[in-house]
Image (cartoon, rainbow, N blue to C red):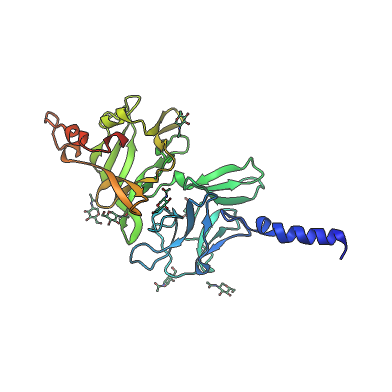
């Protein structure tokens, strides 16, 4: 063996894993298959994407969950209304360049990013430490063509938006699962109501059960606790292109999510490392006064007295 061959062989031995396989991406050459238990994991080991069965169901779904948290906690579901009934699922880049989920060898996908892809740049999907699954076109400035944060299910994570992309018409709303066994679109939703004075609204079916009040420039008027809030960064955008609200935790080590639950509430849930369990730290509607219409237009109601006593009130948003 001459020295050039030897060098090439040694380089391959050491670097081949890095060239042929990237643990956080799905590419034309790197799909994930349910029957091989394959997942992709974000660079910092925060989130994983793979196949799962919710609760006591045996149906298979593609979802995103916290990689290091021992209690399997799904934050996003791809095929939420189109389960796969066996373990033949495969998530791959399809012939048209989309990220698509197939049952076995079937030709029609059960789920797809389903966008028209122009140009010659090949596409790949990558799971990020924020929990966002981004679908990117190479050789096109690495343009993000699609992202899971644009299509929320029941979980609102830091940096995710609630509201409208007014250019594309995309409504980023949060909808409950049907039950713990069925991540299909349920009838509880948490959304931005547009109009002259945009508000966040929690709906049961088409009936509003809670409203945030209007945006004052710093906070939602129905959530005065936010005025004391130094733990989160908030972002309210009201432009020709976008009407949205989002937030993130200044202490990035906090593991927190907001879940719109099929029982009719949106809850803030924090990971407690000491007890290795999730703790519900806030809930809307959080008392009777919060129920929209409960107090009537002239009714007297002071929900804040109750909230003052909450030790975590200052963390509310
Ligand atoms: C599983 O799904 C496939 C494809 O939708 C369908 O043809 C088949 O009948 C289903 N099997 C069962 C046991 O429901
Ligand atoms: C898909 O097709 C290949 C080749 O025909 C076959 O070997 C394989 O078992 C099929 N897979 C499934 C899940 O049907
Ligand atoms: C893709 O989009 C088209 C048009 O909106 C729709 O008819 C089709 O069902 C979608 N396919 C998938 C797999 O989502
Ligand atoms: C909704 O809340 C109930 C009661 O706390 C819980 O058992 C259930 O798992 C929650 N559903 C989801 C999808 O998290
Ligand atoms: C929501 O769904 C549940 C179960 O499917 C049903 O009992 C309830 O009436 C629905 N509520 C509304 C407001 O649609
Ligand atoms: C909070 O927002 C400010 C202003 O936009 C920014 O400078 C800062 O980096 C943000 N902090 C975090 C933790 O996101
Ligand atoms: C979580 O708790 C374990 C012990 O229960 C401890 O070893 C670990 O350092 C803690 N992690 C953090 C981030 O506090």
Q: Which residue is the extreme one toward the right? A: 2
Q: Is residue 270 left or right of residue 289?
A: right
Image quarter where the C terminus lies is: top left
Image quarter where the N terminus lies is: bottom right
What residue is drawn where x is 35% and y is 66%?
57
- How many labels sit on residues? 0
Q: Is residue 205 left or right of residue 107?
A: left
Q: Position of residue 156 (x, y in %)?
A: 38, 44
Q: Is residue 205 visible?
A: no
Residue closest to the eye, 24 or 176:
24
Q: Position of residue 65 (x, y in %)?
A: 43, 54
Question: In the rendered view, would you say 182 is above or below 46?
Answer: below
What residue is drawn where x is 63% and y is 58%?
21
Q: Which residue is the extreme one toward the top? A: 217
Residue 301 image-quadrant placement: top left
Q: Position of residue 117 (x, y in %)?
A: 59, 47
């Amino acid at each position: 063996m001459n020295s050039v061959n030897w060098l090439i062989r040694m380089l391959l031995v050491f670097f081949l894993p890095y060239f042929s396989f990237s643990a956080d991406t799905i590419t034309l050459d790197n799909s994930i298959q349910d029957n091989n238990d394959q997942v992709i994991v974000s660079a910092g080991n925060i989130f994983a994407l793979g196949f799962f069965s919710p609760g006591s169901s045996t149906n298979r779904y593609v979802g995103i969950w916290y990689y290091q948290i021992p209690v399997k906690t799904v934050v996003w579901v791809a095929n939420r209304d189109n389960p796969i009934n066996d373990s033949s699922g495969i998530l791959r880049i399809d012939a048209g360049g989309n990220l698509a989920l197939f049952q076995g060898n079937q030709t029609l996908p059960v789920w797809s990013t389903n966008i028209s892809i122009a140009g010659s740049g090949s596409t790949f999907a990558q799971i990020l430490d924020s929990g966002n699954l981004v679908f990117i076109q190479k050789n096109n400035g690495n343009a993000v063509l699609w992202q899971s944060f644009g299509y929320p299910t029941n979980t609102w994570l830091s940096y995710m938006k609630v509201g409208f992309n007014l250019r594309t018409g995309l409504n980023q709303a949060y909808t409950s699962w049907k039950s713990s066994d069925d991540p299909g679109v349920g009838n509880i939703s948490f959304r931005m109501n547009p109009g002259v004075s945009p508000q966040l609204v929690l709906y049961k079916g088409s009936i509003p059960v809670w409203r945030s009040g209007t945006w004052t420039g710093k906070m939602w008027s129905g959530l005065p606790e936010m005025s004391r809030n130094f733990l989160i960064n908030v972002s309210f955008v009201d432009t020709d292109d976008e009407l949205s609200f989002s937030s993130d935790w200044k202490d990035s080590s906090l593991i927190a999510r907001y879940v719109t639950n099929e029982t009719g509430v949106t809850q803030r849930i924090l990971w407690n490392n000491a007890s290795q369990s999730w703790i519900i730290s806030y809930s809307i509607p959080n008392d009777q006064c919060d129920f929209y219409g409960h107090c009537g237009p002239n009714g007297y109601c002071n929900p804040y007295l109750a909230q003052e006593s909450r030790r975590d009130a200052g963390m509310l948003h």
